Image: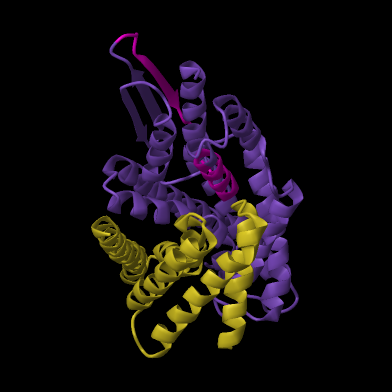
Chain colours: A yellow, B purple
Amino acid sequence: MMILQILSAFSAVLVFTMILEIPKKYMLYASASGAVGWWAYLMVQNSGHSSMLAAFLSTLVVAFLSHILARVKKAPVTVFLITGTLPAVPGAAIYRSVYYFLQNDSALATKNLLETIQIAGAIAMGIFTMDSLFRLVLAYDRKKAEKG
Amino acid sequence: MDEKLLLKAVVLAGEIMLSSGAEVSRVENTMQFMLRRSNCEVTEAVVLATGLFVTMADPGGEPMTFSKRIPARSTNINRICRVNEVSRQFCHMELTVEEAYEELKRIQKEILYKPWMKLAGIIGISVSFIFIYGGNFLDLSTSVLVGICMAAADRFTKILRLNDFSTTAFCGFVVAFSAMLIQELCPFKVSGDVMIMSAIMYLVPGIPFTTAARDTINGDYAAGSARMLECIVVALAVAVGVGFGMVCFRTLWGGTL
């Protein structure tokens, strides 16, 4: 089942690359980034943790991979970052909060709304953390280069 | 060096990048790198989420300022990459101003994938997320129909040139309505929920959200909050559209939600 899900994430990002006009030479790497992100998400979730932690850790993995890929392939980080975080975007939680809201079940509606915000925040935190770490690495590199 | 043409080229580069959804700091850096080739003493590029300004000033001459409003934004990674390449070549003296300007004009019209491929992509998204949300092969086959409806709705709103909210809400409405109709009409048991969740993955604002987060961490709070607001508006539009579609269908068809 997990293989099927990861393949789904791969194909979802692959078709998304056409809508986002991602050049063909980055297509497979971007899709791989999405698949790895979803794999990490599932691994965390299957070991009994919340979807918030899963979103945070999978975004960390994706962001790390994106920064590495961007340097290797000489492309903007965004290319691999936006595609990698796509499967973790809380679309289902938005739908569920609307669904329960229409059923007049405000407890479940609020719970799902909160989950939407938590996952979104976790994704943002993941991007913040990895961007800051790589900025440190860059600053260290520059310092070393200046010293000769 | 033709300073006026350089100014035009820099503004064009910024315009293409910003309307293609690049982060503000990337746009500013690219423009500032290109401005380094000018002979002016003071050059400044300021980029906001909805517009940009470039000023070039020389102690001897008149200062020149160019401002450009960017009303519509979408995501086009190819154009961001291409402008990056051109600006790099331009800074390494491999291109003259005239060549760079011509190349940028060409990039502005460049389209990598044909319209039918994008429509196929929309259908592909509504199909691909089925397994992720726990659907089966039956849901997979019927979600193609939901995808076709969404692609048609997307095309229709593009022709009408509606704003973000209306576009997304209309697509959400069509998705919810068609998915529930298929759930009722299909002789086999298919899950409307799964089909809706899978299809709205195309509508939810995951890409502007990622860019908003990166803008915020770069210190571009104005652009970050503008994009964050865009995400909230689009997410609300999805909620309103899907909710309205479900209520409408149940009112017309009968039955409970």
B97 is higher (above) or lower (below) than B74: above
Residue B75 is a magenta residue: yes
> In the picture provided, is B137 more to the left or to the right than A119?
right
Q: Using the rendered view, name the quadrant where residue B190 is placed.
A: bottom right
- Seen from the viewer's position, the closer of residues B94 and A85 is B94
Residue B203 is a magenta residue: no
Q: Is any part of residue B120 visible from this angle?
A: yes
Residue B173, position as x, y percentages in the image: 57, 52
Point 54% across, 75% down: residue = A35
Q: Is any part of residue B253 visible from this angle?
A: no
What's drawn in magenta, residue-wise? B60-88
Q: Using the rendered view, name the quadrant where residue B222 is placed.
A: top left
Among all residues in the image, which is located at the extreme top? B61
Residue A84, position as x, y percentages in the image: 49, 66
Q: Using the rendered view, name the quadrant where residue B57 is placed.
A: top left
A79 is higher (above) or lower (below) than B50: below
- Seen from the viewer's position, the closer of residues B208 and B53 is B53
Point 49% across, 32% down: residue = B15
Residue A91, position as x, y percentages in the image: 47, 64
Point 59% across, 33% down: residue = B104
- Seen from the viewer's position, the closer of residues B220 and A47 is B220
> In the picture provided, is B250 more to the left or to the right than B187?
left
